[in-house]
């Protein structure tokens, strides 16, 4: 992406064959802060990360990749959510989920879906930003985005071996349970980690950083 390469060069940031990975080697300092302040470039970086990612796919393409994984005898684990502000509760659930199988798929609600579920002020981070964050985690193998209010259609398409949700859900309330179990799969509830939620984080920021 020429615009990104140009901006990186202007701020003394290396541009090389590894693209976005080159940024990881830079000391966090003036150049990165100035680079991120460049108008429009940060969102371009996010979009570039999505395009270059080997983890973020539309559900239909992801289904093809998972078919290949199954031919290799791998177990597919699926979980979903908004994942608006990533926090330790999310990380715990993802680590536990990955331990249940070989391939962890995370499906996230689109921006429009989050707004319908959480209100007009959400999401804090858009769907591309959320997808990039999740795809950067070693325990996450694939990320997909769904536009509906629930992941039912995605679950029907991907047919995971394990459907994982946080323990704050009752087993009967887990969307897609019937589909997964009919396919011979299992539903697993991960113990809920109290004290962590996006809403709590937003409230904490609003309380402690409100200007007088």
Image (spheres, helix red, strand yellow):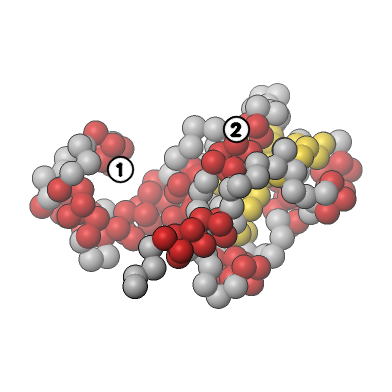
- How would you rate the neighbour count of disc 2 (Cα within 10 Å): few for under 14, some for 14-19, many for 20 or more? some
Residue 92: x, y in percent? 60, 36
Within the image, what quadrant is residue 64 found in?
A: top right
Residue 142: x, y in percent? 56, 41
Q: CA distance from mark 2 to mark 1?
A: 25 Å
Compared with 158, 151 (above or below) is below
Residue at the limit of the structure toward the top, as seen here? 73
Q: Earlier in the sequence, mark 2 or mark 1?
A: 1
Badge 2 marks a residue whose secondary structure is helix
The structure residue drawn at horizontal position 51% and vertical position 62%, both measured from the top left corner, is 203
Compared with 149, 27 (above or below) is above
| Side of 59 where 10 appears, left or right | left
Marks 2 and 1 in Cβ contact (< 8 Å): no
- How would you rate the neighbour count of disc 1 (Cα within 10 Å): few for under 14, some for 14-19, many for 20 or more? some
Residue at the limit of the structure toward the front, as seen here? 212
- The residue under label 1 is 20
- The residue under label 2 is 95
For this rendering, which residue is in front, 57 or 135? 135
Compared with 50, 20 (above or below) is above
């Amino acid at each position: 992406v020429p615009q990104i390469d140009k901006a990186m060069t202007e701020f003394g940031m290396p541009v090389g064959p590894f693209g976005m990975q080159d940024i990881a080697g830079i000391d966090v300092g003036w150049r990165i802060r100035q680079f991120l302040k460049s108008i429009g470039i940060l969102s371009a970086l996010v979009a570039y990360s999505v395009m270059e990612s080997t983890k973020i796919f539309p559900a239909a393409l992801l289904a093809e990749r998972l078919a290949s994984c199954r031919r290799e005898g791998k177990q597919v684990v699926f979980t979903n959510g908004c994942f608006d502000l990533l926090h330790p509760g999310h990380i715990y659930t993802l680590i536990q989920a990955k331990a249940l199988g070989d391939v962890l798929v995370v499906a996230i609600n689109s921006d429009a879906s989050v707004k319908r579920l959480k209100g007009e002020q959400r999401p804090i981070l858009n769907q591309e930003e959320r997808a990039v964050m999740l795809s950067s985690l070693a325990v996450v193998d694939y990320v997909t985005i769904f536009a509906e209010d629930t992941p039912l259609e995605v679950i029907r398409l991907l047919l995971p071996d394990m459907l994982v949700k946080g323990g704050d859900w009752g087993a009967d309330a887990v969307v897609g349970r019937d589909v997964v179990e009919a396919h011979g799969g299992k539903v697993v509830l991960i113990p809920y980690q109290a004290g962590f939620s996006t809403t709590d984080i937003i409230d904490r920021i609003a309380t402690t950083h409100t200007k007088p």
